[in-house]
Image (tube, rainbow, N blue to C red):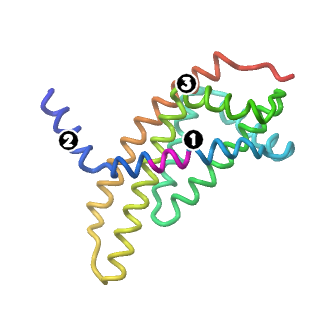
Amino acid sequence: MIRRVKNFLVWLWRRLPDLWLTIIVAVILAALFSAATLTPMSGAEAESVQEFISSYLAQDLATRIFLNNFVVALIGEIPFLGLPILGYVVYNSGRFVGWHLAEFGFNLQMVLSLVFATTFLSGYGLLEFMGYALSATKSIQVSRRLAKALLRKERVDGGRVVEECGATLLAAAIFLALGACIEAYFIESLTLPKP
């Protein structure tokens, strides 16, 4: 049993994207999210997002958060388009958080401190950004491989690409599931009353 687990972990590790590129992408996504909190959404835009989120997350918060984040990671793995779409989603998430904090009366100087404390020190933000970054990094690698193959008029081993993308999604799902559990606990325990 232990040998099977070890073999699985070795198999998974060999198929994951480059670790350093993943960390760089995670830092860029986290910086984009943090910067976006300083440009909050307009009231009407944010209220429509709030309504959707409230209805969507009404049942089983952790599962819904995980499914939402997994869909984002899945989209983030699309070659050529994944990273820009993922950046757009992360930026707008940051804008929504910025609006939410402004609604509670926090000024811009406090927003970054609060975002850092809640998102990164609680751990769920780090886990989510690593899950997203794994998908985005695999998108970059597959895009590069496809571009090289097109320029050289070579064939790409589609089976290997699918296997690597699946392994990356599995690893991303683990990060996202842990992050969703922490985020759900955090939301349920620290829900602030609306002023």
User: Could you tell me residue 140's position as x and y percent?
Assistant: 42, 61
According to the picture, the residue beneath numbered tag 3 turns out to be 122
Residue linked to disc 2: 10
What amino acid type is highlighted by mark number 2?
A: Val
Residue sitting at x 83%, y 23%: 194
- The span shown in magenta is 24-29
Work out whether mark 2 precedes mark 1 in sequence or the reverse, and give the earlier one.
2
Q: Is residue 139 magenta?
A: no
The quarter of the picture where the N terminus appears is top left
Q: Residue at x 79, y 45 (%)?
A: 41
Residue wearing tag 1 = 68
Q: Label 1 is placed on what type of residue?
A: Asn
The mark total stands at: 3
Helix, strand, or loop for circle 2? helix
As helix, strand or loop, the secondary structure at mark 1 comes to helix
Q: Residues within 10 Å of mark 1 (few under 14, many from 20)?
A: some
